[in-house]
Structures are given as structure tokens and as C-alpha cells.
Image: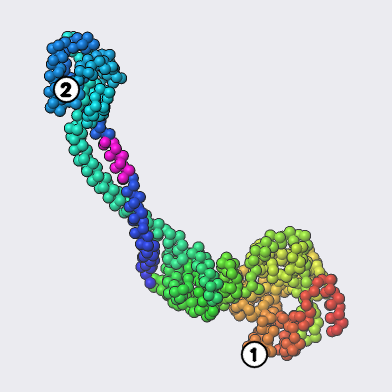
Amino acid sequence: MAFPQIRLLSRRRVSVEARQVTNRSTVRLFLTYAAISLVPVLVLGLVLAATYRSEARRRGLAAGRAEAALVARTAVEPLLDGTPLGSGLSDEEQSHMGQLTTRALRDGDLLRLRLRSLTGRVVFAEEADQVGLPGTHESLDAAEGRVVAKLTHLETDQLSSVASPAAVEVYLPLVAGEPARRVGVLEIYLPYAPINADVSAGLQSLYKSLAAGLLLLWLALFAISASVSRRLRREVAVNAFLAEHDALTSLPNRSRFRTCASEGLAQMRRTGVPIAVAIVDLDRFKEVNDTLGHRSGDEVLVEIGRRLRDTVGPADTVARLGGDEFGIVLADGTNANAALLAIREVIGAELTVGALPLSVESSIGFVLAPEDGHDVDALLQRADVAMYLAKARHTGVAHYDALEDHYDASNLGLIGELRPAIASEQLVLHYQPKATVLDGGVESVEALVRWQHPAHGLMLPARFLPRVEQTDLIHELTAWVLRRALLDVVDLGVGVAVNVSARDLSRRDFADRVRGILHDVGVAPELLTLEITETAILVDPARAAEVLGELEDAGVRVSIDDFGQGQTSLGYLSVLPVHELKVDRQFVDDMLTNHAHGAIVRSIIDLGHNLGMQVVAEGVERQDVLDALRLAGCDTAQGFLLARPMSIAALPSWLAASRARV
């Protein structure tokens, strides 16, 4: 297995899936963008066209002004003697102007020509009846030295019934005489058609160039934008894929896994086929990272992800939830346990990291819907609980068991209430006697804690103790139980057994704390037995051996509780200062019907005796079982057959009655 190739394969998978996402909307996005990008180009074209038309009109007027100025300077002003036109034209001036006007009108160079005085009154026109017309504001502006030009038509007025074509109407001052001075105003109408034809020809060419330029601009912009947007869409598709997938393995991530679980529940409701939701955790994966490095750890995760993906069915889902944890949704959970056992075998198959062969074990917890719930969050939380149960029991695969679930929200809230509950004496102890098998004599009792909760009533330890054992509050609880139990039995003439947790054994000063409590209460150390589970010893065997040795030096007895349930090494057992073995009730209860369990009970009894220990059988509820234990040589029995747990108020009278029977 080569890690770079795996990483490359992962990236290719992302690329392929991202491309599939992109191609689905390419045509639609192309057409949409083409239409949208064309709009501003068209708007720009219209604006430029309007600007060009305005510029063409301005140029037409400029041409009209220039032509009018040329007529004035070369044809009209030379005919004037410098006398203001308000005095009228001389006969000679009148004759010359008539000839000029007639020729220009005949040739079509002009449409109309008038001379006006500085007050605007018409003093010469091609039609005699127009002479004397009053001034206009344009003529008055020209009389003051300004040139006025505008596009117009020779409209029919009260003096003429002939409408002329479009024209450039120009008013400009006339200058004559020595010295030169303004003598009047020239009003001239030039035909606009020649000017317009020339301007329009240029404008048409400009429009064509504009259209071609805008088209090329649109194509260029579209090509650039299409290229950029294509890359952006690809990046968006990749980001969308990565938002719901693990970058290392390309598997769905926790968010996508939750969605797939929801979809599976919806499918389950439609078809009635149960689904399984499983959490897979790789055992001791931290050792791989710490020993071989995170690169090798990533290589292992990629390979495990590939195996899971290749093992499940097409309708199933595999996800990486984070770290060394994976999730599985089986669309058909009918045979979930068998399927997950097979998956675990696939995970555990040998793989090679570099040149080193490895075998990765896993713990899998699963839930079934609708059996274990209908809500996605609840199912995921319960699958997680089942996974930790599989890890703790070393079973590989475990189905969720509500009786083993100590992690509901109400229990979590209880942890915050426990410390004040200890201070306010809400906790109480019940005691279950341990009797000798031969004669039924009672030499000790086991203290069992209860919580008299003001709202929930009397709660058994299974409701709150598993969570407390995960916090430092267990130290305070253990100290309270030790002190209370010793105070309760100090005058009863019996020993007392108290359960302690792995967290208690992890404290360096635990033995000193026990000695201090014994001293404060004034109880002989040999009357106290501390019961410790096998798993608590295995958490840190070296530290456990050190603490147990200190307790033995102090005179305190040590018992291994639930023996047979864990995996205590006989090597450890032979060197640990242990005085008592308590056979787990699962072997005792059916020892008469389950030959294997019967053999285990007898073997533990022989083992304990050979190591110089006493043996206690838990969970004795039938007389025939007690008789069998007696025949096997068991020392002590404990169970409902002998006595149920009782309050300290009931214990003295029960002990008295028991001693009377013996």
C-alpha cells in the first residue's frame, strides 16, 4: 500500500464526484449567464448609440454654423457698406442681396436667407412681404454677438403656405465697415439633408464598428467570465463535497452521516424494514500514531475506509466521524449483528504500512430502528454507548442495552446534585450479609450505597455511580461511604466490605486516606475489606499493586470483586496482596445447569484456596446452588437466599436472629 497513491485516489474521487455535480447544471448556468451578461452590453450599446446620435446632431449643427459663417464672411458682409441695417439697405445692397439670394435658392444651397437689424426686425428677405417682421429671441441673441444654430423645419407660417424640408437654422452677427462693427444679423436656413447624409454615413459606419466591438467585447467577457466561473463552480462543487465528506478518506463526514441516518429512518417508515446504525472505533489506534507517526496513521485510516466502503452494500452508508471513528448505516438491519461481525473481520485483516504488517482491531456498537428509537440523535448517542460497552467487555460487537446506558441527560444532571447531596446526608447505606457456607455464620456485611433523592426517591447505585466513577467526585463519595460504613458497624461485631473504583486506586494517597478514616472512627483495620474489580486493577497494574501493598501493610483486607468477568493475569494474581476472590454471579446462578459455568466456579474455588485466599460466591438465590457450593468447598456465600440488602436500622436485629440460629 503506497500512501501517496491512496491520497491521489482520494483526490481523484473528489474530483470525479465534484465534476458530476458541476455538469448537472452547466447548460442551465451557461444560458443564464449568457443572457445576463448580454444585458449590460446591450445597455452600453444603447447608451453609446444615443451618445453617437447626439454627437452627430452636434456635428451637424457645427457644420451648419461653419457654412453660415462662410456665407456671411464671403458673400454677405462684403456687400454691406458698414451702415447699421436698421437704416435699411441701399438700392445697390438690395440688388446684390437679391441676386445672391436668388442664385443660392435656385441652386439649393440655401432654403432661406434674411437680414435683420440689430433690433431683430427683418430688413431683407427673398419674399418682400416678410420685410418688417419683428425680431425673435434668437435674432436678438445674435445681435449681441452670439451665434445661434438649431435643427428645424421651415414651418408654414402666416405669410407662407409652403413647408420646407429639414434645415439648420442659424443666426449670427454681421460685421462690416471700417472700423469693423456689428451692423445686423444674418438669418439663414441651410438644407440639412446634405449635412445629415454626410453625418449619417459616418454614423452608420460607426454603428457597425460599435456593434462589432461590443460583440467582440461580449464574447471576450463571456469567455473570460465563463472560464473563471467554471473554475469557481468547480471550487464550489469541491467545497460542497468536502463540506459533507472527509478530506482524507472521501467518505461522508459526521454531518452527512446524520443526514443519511435520517434518510434511512424515512425509508424504514415506508418499507417497515429495520435499519441498523453502528459506530466503529479502532482499538489502540493511538499506538499506531505514536509509534509509526501520523502519516502512517492516515494511511491506515484510508485503507480501513476503503475496506468498509467495499464491504457494505450499495444501499448502505459508511462515514468517517472523526479521528479513528467510523459510522455505518445498514439499510437492512435484520441480521445486523452477523453483518457487523463480518465487517469487524474485514477491518482486522492484515494490512501493510511501509514494510510493517499490522492488524487493527475494532469495537462496534449498534442500534436498531425502530427497536431502539426513532430519533437520529438518540440513535447515534445509543450506538456510541453500545460501542463503549463493546470496548469495555471486549466483545467486538455489542447491541445497545438500555440497562447499561448510564448516560441519559437526567443522569448527567444528577452528577451536579451529588456533591451537595453528600453534604446534606441524602445518601444512605444498605447492608447485605455474607455468611459462611458451612454453618451460616455472618462475619461481615457489604455496604451498598443508595441515594434518597428528594425528587426521584430512593435511587440504586446503577442510576448514578457509573457516571460518578468517571469524575473526581468518586473520591469524595468513597470517603463518605468508608466513614459511614465503619461508624455503622463499629459496635455490631462484624466486618464491613466497601467497593472502591479504579479512580480511587489511581490516587497516591488513597492508602493514607483509608488509614486516616480508620483512625478517626477507631475501627480495627482487619474489619475493613475493600472490594476492587478486575478491570480496576488492569487500568494500571503497577500502581494498583503499590496501593494494595500499602493497604495490606495497614492491615486492610482486599477482595477482587466479580472475579471471572475480567481478564486478570494469573501472574498478577499470584503477586498481588489479595485476601479474597468473589466469584461473579453470572457463573454461580446457573452452575448446576451450565456445566462450563460449574467447572469455572469449582476452578476459581480451587485457585483461590491454592493461593491462600478465601472464596465468596455472589448471587446465591437457591438452596441447591448453596449445597453445590458447600460440596465444592466455597467459604462464603452472598445473595437473596441468605438476605437482601437492608438498612442499618434493620441490621442489628437480623444479625441477632442469625446468630441465634447458628
- Residue 324 falls left or right of residue 448: left
Horizontal and vertical percent position of residue 78? 14, 15
Q: Residue at x 46, y 73 (%)?
A: 315
Q: Main secondary structure of the magenta part?
A: helix
For the C terminus, which image quadrant? bottom right
Nearer the observer, 659 or 544: 659
Residue mark closest to the camera, 1 vs 2: 2
Of the two numbered discs 1 and 2 on the same chain, state the one appearing first in sequence: 2
Q: Quadrant of residue 68?
A: top left
Q: Amino acid at mark 2?
A: Leu
- Disc 2: which residue: 70
Q: Amino acid at mark 1?
A: His
Whether residue 67 sits left or right of residue 538 in the image: it is left
> Which one is in front, 299 or 366?
366
User: Quadrant of the rendered structure where residue 167 is?
Assistant: top left
Residue under label 1, please give it.
595
Residue 51 is one of the magenta-drawn residues: yes
Other-residue count near label 1 (Cα within 10 Å), few / some / many at <14 / 14–19 / ≥20: few
Please tell me in which quadrant of the rendered image residue 18 appears.
bottom left
The magenta region covers 42-53
